[in-house]
Amino acid sequence: MQGTFPTAPVSMPTVLVTGFDPFGEATVNPSWLAAQALHGRVIAGHRMVAALLPTSFGESVLRLDAALLRHAPRLVLCLGLAGGRTALSLERVAINVDDARIPDNAGAQPVDTPAVAGGPAAYFGTLPIKAMLRALLQAGVRAEVSQTAGTFVCNHVFYGLMHRLAQPRWQGVRGGLVHLPWLPGQGQPSMPLETMVGALAMALECALTTTADLRLAAGALD
Ligand code: PCA
């Protein structure tokens, strides 16, 4: 019988968690370490599946496409490093602009270029960021809602994700981006990997069990 059933049937719905490879001067990227740490965990009845995206404007969205098709997730959480940020940044919006201060890992450095030619100016993420923020702050994790994911590859992937999820074939699939601080030793301010992973598991649990987001000013949650 061996070989007849190459893979066990996996009926549990999945969550796709993506992370990036190191870029610029960084030698590790906490986003990929965190995604790997979450891989295989079951949260709120969903199996976490990690996928690595290259920090490349061109290749990242192609890999994202492949991962979406392969895993058909119910929810997608993209993770990225934003060195210099103090807190886990729950990104609100992806904009249709690529404007790179440094070359990506493939040497591309687009300036004032649309992420998707002819696409809308912006997409909001569809994760319940205020509910997630409250859960994180109540657990004592440094977290914030961020109003800009920048204009480098993270924003590009976030925009590409929301552009795809807006298509009828992905109806009902929610998506978002969380930026992570540096790891200890990478720079200051920093956050230990275990803290990030625990916080992300909590944020995912919240996202998977919350249908309507809270309507609270971010400041009211501090
Ligand atoms: N951070 C970069 C791209 C990859 C990553 O981890 C960004 O914030 O755009």
Image (cartoon, grey):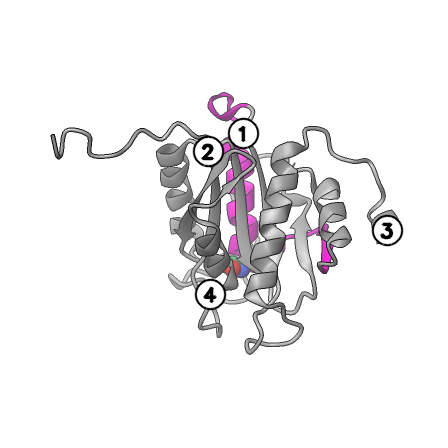
Q: Residue furthest right?
A: 220
- Who comes first in sequence, dot 3 or dot 4? 4
Hey, which residue is sitting farthest front in the picture? 1
| Whole-percent x, y for residue 158 in the image | 55, 45
Q: Which residue is mark 3?
A: 219
Instruction: State which quarter of the image contains the N terminus.
Output: top left
| Residue 150 lies within the magenta run | yes
The magenta stretch spans residue 83: no
Q: Can residue 116 be seen in the rendering of this structure?
A: no
The kind of secondary structure element at disc 1 is loop
Q: Tell me which label, 2 or 1, sits earlier in the chain.
A: 2
Residue range in magenta is 142-171
Q: Which residue is mark 1?
A: 173
Amino acid type, mark 2:
Pro
For the residues marked 3 and 4, what is the alpha-carbon distance in whole angstroms? 36 Å
Give, as a three-letter code, the residue at label 3.
Answer: Gly
Q: How much space separates mark 2 and mark 3, taking CA atoms?
A: 32 Å
Q: Nearer the viewer, mark 4 or mark 1?
A: 1
Does label 1 or label 3 sit earlier along the sequence? Answer: 1
Quadrant containing the C terminus in the rendered view:
bottom right
